[in-house]
Image: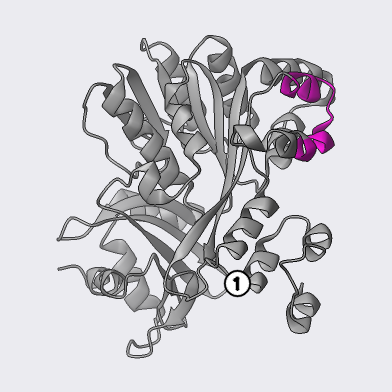
Amino acid sequence: MAKIDALLLEVISQKGSDLHLAQGKKPKIRVNGQLTELLQWPILEEQALAEMMQETLSKNAWNSFKDTGDTDLAYTIEDGTRFRCNYFRHFYGYGAVFRMIPSKLMTLDELGVPEIVKKFADYQSGLVLITGPTGSGKSSTMAAIIDDINTKYERKIVTIEEPVEFLHKNKESIIVHREVGEDTKSFSQGLRTALKSDVNIILVGEMRDKETIELALTAAEMGILIFGTLHTNSAPKTISRIIDVFPQKQKNQIREILANTLKAVISQQLVRSADEKRRWVACEILTRTSALASIIRRGETDRLDNEIQMNRASGMITMDSYLLDLVKSGKITNDEAYIKAINKTAFRKNDVFEPEEEIEQSL
């Protein structure tokens, strides 16, 4: 058994989500959103940490990491549990983060996302964006939607990820997994190849650069259903982020394409439960309305919150409204909701919330 496996088994036994390793520090694991130091483990010296990291990489991959200072990979321990890994160099030496990939694909019901998200699997074309910070459950939500499609429809689905996380078995659909760095050079190259493969649906693990975003929009215009992720925390910021990637002379063209193709945005984050025994997903949902295309074309993203609120009966909801609902149901505390709220000034005025003084001062 590799030395790193003992630490990863500790994550599993404590029902954690992540393992954090940093040279000169003891290992830490994240459980229900909280980082806890593994006191029984020694401080990680350079040689010991380097040996652990090398166990998971080929010689060429290790040499490449030493040259670049960054690498991403998927690693499987002996019991079959898979981890998404990020290795990096920092001021004090080596570092690594391992995120456990659930062995079982969770359904949308099990994840607790709003009912309207189930409709995303029924779309035939267009762009669906799933956004949120690292560790917000984007990959799990995306995998659940893909599994729903795979169960109900005969589709050709290509996933482009870095690394591949959830492995789908073919049910009604044909699913091709491609890993950036192993099977394709980049997200954009993977997209180009997918467009030539008689594909119905493409999952883009991260829309991080202009070329990838432009290709994804082009594919959506062609009638392909695109699922993509971004590190944004609201629907307005997601739309602005896509448009802002492009130079001024191209922005109007991109607004037009986005207005014609955007089907839905789900922005999500995980929040600690009131009893601190689990985490709940909190979502902002934007779906296509008759007014959405006009809002995007005119660059009036400040109107989106109002558009979402006006269409709550159809399943749309703002992040702050979702957080308030979680507070009212007793699932999370007032303070946790306030910390995660987007518009804290407006959030403070709600009658369900009376933030403690120290929480207000810390934000």
Relative side of 242 to 143, left or right: right
Q: Secondary structure at mark 1?
A: loop
| Region rendered in magenta | 291-306
Q: Quadrant of residue 92?
A: bottom right
Amino acid beneath label 1: Thr
Relative side of 196 to 91, left or right: left
Could you tell me residue 271's position as x and y percent? 54, 63
Relative side of 206 to 237, left or right: left
Q: Is residue 75 visible?
A: yes
Relative side of 141 to 77, left or right: right
Q: Which residue is located at x 52 percent, y 33 percent?
A: 228
- Against 296, residue 75 (above or below) is below
Q: Which residue is mark 1?
A: 333
Could you tell me residue 158's position as x and y percent? 36, 25
Q: Which residue is located at x 76 percent, y 35 percent?
A: 304
User: How many labels, in total?
Assistant: 1
- Against 270, residue 354 (above or below) is below
- Viewer-nearest residue: 351 or 257: 351
Quarter holding the N terminus?
Answer: bottom left
Q: Quadrant of residue 201?
A: top left
Could you tell me residue 219's position as x and y percent? 53, 15
